[in-house]
Amino acid sequence: MAASLTLHWSPKSPYVRKVMVCAHELGIVPRLTLVRSVAAMLKPNPAIMAVNPLSKIPTLVREDGLALFDSVVICEYLDDLAGGSLFPKQGEVRWQALRWHAFGDGLLDALILWRNERERAVPLQPLLDAFELKTRAALQMLDAEAAALAASPFSIGQVTVGCALGYLDYRFDAFGWRAQAPRLADWFATLRERPSFAATEPIDG
Ligand SMILES: N[C@@H](CCC(=O)N[C@@H](CS)C(=O)NCC(=O)O)C(=O)O
């Protein structure tokens, strides 16, 4: 029987969602043992730190004890394990996939810092303004690339951009991103219908 993999997991984390979307796409969800893990910047979690000193999720622990992180590495590992094509090996499609992957991750990093700042007792307004400016610009760029996102082979690029948009829905509902990026919104509406995305909608709890 194939070795099982333990994933430090939360239904709220967009980076964990990337991993789960990949696992669904690759048909290897049954190989994952999910361990509900709380990772909070202000409260390092000893259970995660035992395998990942950075106390971040996702962290994947193999049966031989090796812990893999972060989501970038885990997603590629799962793709390799399953013989998938979420990480195109060569050509222009590879660079486009990696570019969208990096961009989606960068947008998520900004959104998470934005949310942290927003929730402070006295947020720094110039920082909030800067995150909003970058997010609007990111949406503008992705909206211009909506046709390319739809036409390119499905890859880690679409997975990650989709998880970033899902996080906007989850934590920035009032921001109304769809009105700023209508073509992207249409693309995302189709993406959300994929079983891998439908099965991993963020939830509280
Ligand atoms: N670059 C990392 C980011 C992971 C990350 O920041 N995860 C958050 C949860 S959404 C976390 O673990 N935060 C806890 C912390 O920063 O201490 C990845 O792609 O996996």
Image: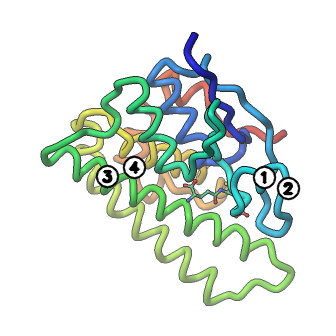
Quadrant position of ligand 1: bottom right
Give the farthest residue toward the top. Answer: 1
In the displayed structure, does residue 141 sit left or right of residue 79? left
Which circle, 2 or 4, is nearer the viewer?
A: 2
Give the farthest residue toward the front. Answer: 64
Of the numbered discs 2 and 3, the one sitting upstream in the chain is: 2
What residue is shown at x 43% (from left), y 44% (from top)?
185
Above or below: residue 173 compared with residue 204: below
Q: Amino acid at mark 2?
A: Pro
What residue is shown at x 38% (from left), y 32% (from top)?
80
In the displayed structure, does residue 121 sit left or right of residue 128? right
User: Does any atom of ligand 1 lie closer than 8 Å to the CB of label 1?
Assistant: no
Q: Which residue is mark 1?
A: 50
Q: Which mark is residue 182?
A: 4
| Mark 1 Cα shell of 10 Å, populated few (<14), some (14-19), many (≥20) | few
Q: Are marks 4 and 1 in contact (CB under 8 Å)?
A: no
In this rendered view, identify the residue nearer to me: 35 or 52: 52
Q: Which mark is residue 144?
A: none
Q: Amino acid at mark 4?
A: Pro
Q: Amino acid at mark 3?
A: Leu
In this rendered view, identify the residue nearer to me: 41 or 89: 89
Which circle, 4 or 1, is nearer the viewer?
A: 1
Instruction: State the image coordinates of residue 83 (x, y, percent, origin top left).
Output: 35, 24
What residue is shown at x 64% (from left), y 30% (from top)?
63
Which circle, 3 or 4, is nearer the viewer?
A: 3
Cα distance in 3D space between marks 1 and 2: 6 Å
Q: Which residue is mark 2?
A: 46
Q: Are marks 1 and 2 in contact (CB under 8 Å)?
A: yes
Q: Which residue is mark 3?
A: 98
